[in-house]
Image (cartoon, rainbow, N blue to C red):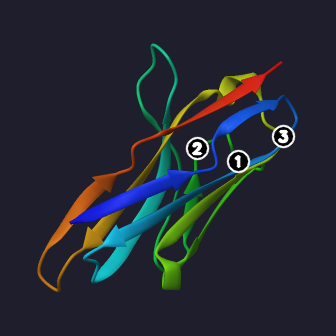
Amino acid sequence: QVQLVESGGGLVQAGESLRLSCAAAGSIFSVNVMGWYRQAPGKQRELVARITSQHVTNYADSVKGRFTISRDNAKNTVYLQMNSMKPEDTAVYYCNADIWSSRWHSNNYWGQGTQVTVSS
């Protein structure tokens, strides 16, 4: 059994910063791509940023230059540093990861989501 446990959400004012963390736990052989998605009320879930095990990253245009994704492979943990936050960043943020539980079996997993609210 594999779980993604998120932390770090909350309420901030516009211009402030917040850092999200997501740790993969359970029966893990290796972790491939890890990423963050978000879903605002009435909108579809969208990619925010993702990072490979070799630390190659890509970002949504709306967060480029403000958000930074990173990971600690030894801890199977991914981080999202969010700076210069805007009210439109308000959403539930979900961690996502491709995890191999053995050499032959992988699955895609989602975290439970953490609320991020940015007030103007």
> Sequence-wise, which precedes: disc 1 or disc 3?
1
Q: Secondary structure at mark 2?
A: loop
Rendering quarter of residue 78: bottom right
Q: Could you tell me if residue 62 is visible in this image?
A: no
The location of residue 2, given as percent across then percent down, is 27, 65
Residue of label 3:
84
Residue of label 2:
60
- Pick whichever, 27 or 47, lies toward us: 27
User: Which is in the foreground here, disc 1 or disc 3?
Assistant: 3
- Please tell me which residue is depicted at 26% across the width and 58% down the height of the picture: 108
Q: CA distance from mark 1 to mark 2?
A: 6 Å
Residue of label 1:
64
Q: Secondary structure at mark 1?
A: loop
Question: Does the CB distance between marks 1 and 2 fall below 8 Å?
Answer: yes
Going by the picture, which residue comes out furthest to the top? 42
- Pick whichever, 9 or 31, lies toward us: 9
Q: CA distance from mark 2 to mark 3?
A: 15 Å
Q: Is 89 on the left-hand or right-hand side of 44? A: right
Q: Secondary structure at mark 3?
A: loop
